[in-house]
Amino acid sequence: MLKWYSALSNRTISIIIILCILMLYLSYTFNSCLVSSIHRTFRKIQAPEQNVLPPAKSSDPTQVNIFGSIVRIVPLTGAIQHAFNESDGSPKYRFLRQQGLQPSRHLPDTLIIGVKKSGTRALLEFIRLHPDVRAAGCEVHFFDRHYAKGFHWYRNHMPATIEGQVTMEKTPSYFITKEVPQRVHHMNPGTKLLVVVRDPVTRAISDYTQAASKKPGMKKFEELVFLNGSYGVSVIDTSYGPVKIGVYARHLERWLQYFPLSQLLFISGERLIVDPAYELGRVQDFLGLKRVVTEKYFYFNSTKGFPCLLKSEARSSPHCLGKTKGRNHPYIDPIAIDRLRDFYRPFNIKFYQMTGIHFGWL
């Protein structure tokens, strides 16, 4: 019997030999790559510090030698982070940096001008949750204390923003300072103004409480509010700061000499505590912003009696604004409170008429 391969032609045999050689070559190449890859992986696990060589000798400290190649290390935040001049890793600013947008400092187009002890700090912290709002972190007091330093100085105290973002600053004393309305108008007659107001009696007591906490041995509230310290027959001392601030109608008259009512938004300090999402909705509408800050950001701390944040730009865990928020007020004689309410009532009514809002203060 002839062997099976005797029937094959020389050409067929040649093709079979070539195919066998090709398969052997491919098999060898594959197994060599596999073994090499496994070996490199094993070396990385054993000695990861050997992967990166010491920095290359270069005048640029951001260049390093990695596997024989000169690579320039560029921070994720880049020049934009330097311009912001603050550490901010929140998603909204990472997005802005990815777009290559260059921020710059601008004079504010929105001011929280008052009123002290009415919730201005809470409003600022709440509205800063919005990705299109950038605000100075502290009270700059430019228009009432540092106006002589000029607008260039003021601009340098503002955060860097990009086109479409709102630049904001808060100084509660602006509302009651006589010279401020004209100065703000000189900066920008189109400035939008936010005014947080609160029952003037409660506001005065809160103002006193803060001052007393910093000055042990301070006179009682009743002794400071009434002339000669006797609230039974004496008149109210309208020159006393905590009392004077609460006469909102008089302060508003000065602002309306330079700004139309449409450029002022009045926020209820009481409602800001009970329903912050509602007031923040009004603020966002007023500023022409999409309603981003909603009830999902807030929870109510029953111990402090104050709204707190479930999350914020800086912290992802629930937290309140500060230890001083929700501070307990001292006992005030009800007679003194009633007399103070009688004093404020006509001014409150006039304020309601001027703003077109009834705040419900007795």
Image: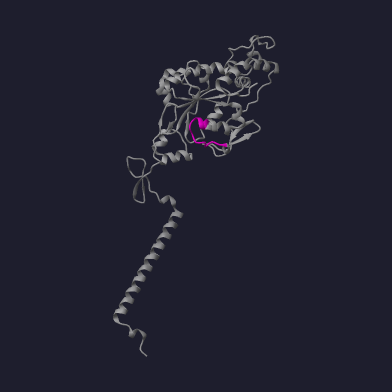
Q: Colour mode? A: one colour
Q: Nearer the viewer, residue 262 or 325?
A: 262
Q: Position of residue 204 (x, y in %)?
A: 61, 19
Residue drawn at x 42%, y 36% as measured from the top left: 81
Magenta stretch holds residue 45:
no
Query: At x 55% / y 27%, what residue is drawn?
Result: 121
Which secondary structure class fits the magenta region best?
Answer: loop
Check the image and report above or below for 21 versus 231.
below
Quadrant where the C terminus lies?
Answer: top right
Front in this rendered view, residue 49 or 96: 96
Q: Which of the 4 image quarters holds residue 13?
A: bottom left
Residue 219 position by quadrant: top right
Residue furthest bottom as drawn: 1
Residue visible at 39% across and 35% down? Answer: 102
Highlighted magenta segment, given as a residue range: 283-294
Residue placed at 50% from the left, 15% from the top?
178
Q: Position of residue 191 (x, y in %)?
A: 46, 25
Q: Considering depth in this image, is 263 or 21 the residue closer to the camera? A: 263
Camera-nearest residue between 88 and 64: 88
Tell me, yes or no, if residue 279 can be seen here: yes
What is the number of callouts on the image?
A: 0
Q: Which residue is at the far left?
A: 11
Relative to 274, residue 175 above or below? above
Q: Is residue 278 above or below residue 348?
A: below
Measuring from the top left, give residue 24's x and y in whole percent: 36, 71
Q: Position of residue 119 (x, y in %)?
A: 57, 26
Looking at the rendered image, the quarter that the N terminus falls into is bottom left
Q: Does the image show residue 144?
A: no
Q: Relative to 6, is 112 on the left or the right?
A: right
